[in-house]
Image (spheres, rainbow, N blue to C red):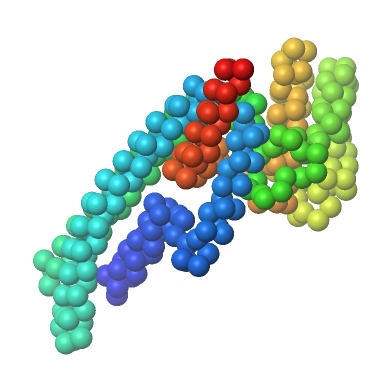
Amino acid sequence: MRLKKEIFNLMIVLFILNSLIFPFNFEKNDKKLNQLKKEIHFLNLLNGLDLKPQQIEFIKEKIKEKSEIEESAREKLQLKEKELFLVLEEIKNYLIKGNEIPDSLKQKYHRIHTQIKRELMITNERIKELASEVENILEDHQKYQLRNFVPCIIPPKGELRIGQANDYSGVVRMLERIRKIPERVYRWNKERIIFRTIERMKVNLFPWNEIDENEMENYFSKLFDKVRALSDADFQLQKDKLAEELISTFSPKKKKQDLIDKIRFFLLDPDIIPILEHKLNLNDQVEIR
């Protein structure tokens, strides 16, 4: 029974592999349409990021490395899948006859299963490392925009750069008021201040979301202390980011993908290379003029 369960789990792992390493497996009739949509998504992203030529060249190199890693993994896993098929056929034959599966066959299955999982893990970690390298060359405003990027065909009206549609001015003003409260008053009334803040935010920002008030209380306690401890200069630099983090933490929408995942699935997609090269050509034309 345990072996049957493990076989089922392995089939799930192989399905996930197919989804992760070959994420864009379109039907023939829809391929051109979906490819066009995908290119528009990339254009919206790159128009907002405004990458420098050096960044573009670096990303292209990392895409090449990612493709090599995936090709190597694909070859290894195809061989393992063939081995797995033969082992499963043997297991099936024993089960059809009502016979006990030999220990040697069980061990062979477990060995292949472990090798497939290990290869998937190694491949995933290597690609994450590439994404991390790309993250390191992005500027703060580019990371912010990428973190907030949502694939779309037509950007929101008036939004020339991704990420500009969000207005956190109300939250920023709230944080500014927290900073102005005298220290003694803040310490004596901290719990009441947090309670009133949560009540206002539940009504104004999250009216349809089920809020864990204990989680919010702990979050605001740490946030307010952090905000008050910042220098004036540091607060001016961080206030928008702090407001955005507050909203995204308790927003009823799905939590945004991790930045590394965004880089992996957008900036490291081989299909983005022609658009990156187009951006480079435009930069060259501007310099010539």
Q: Position of residue 163 (x, y in %)?
A: 71, 36
47 shown above or below 255: above
Write down the quadrant of residue 143 in the picture: top right
Of residues 220 and 8, which is closer to you in this image?
Answer: 8
Q: Can see residue 236?
A: yes
Residue extending farthest to the bottom is 97
The structure residue drawn at horizontal position 46% and vertical position 31%, both measured from the top left corner, is 59
In the picture, which quadrant includes the C terminus?
Answer: top right
Q: Can see residue 142?
A: no
The structure residue drawn at horizontal position 81% and vertical position 36%, both measured from the top left corner, is 167
271 shown above or below 84: above
Q: Position of residue 110 (x, y in %)?
A: 22, 61
Q: Position of residue 133 (x, y in %)?
A: 44, 28
The structure residue drawn at horizontal position 18% and vertical position 63%, both measured from the top left corner, is 83
Write down the quadrant of residue 57 in the picture: top left
In the picture, which quadrant includes the N terminus?
Answer: bottom left
Of residues 223 and 186, which is closer to you in this image?
Answer: 223
Q: Is residue 229 left or right of residue 2?
A: right
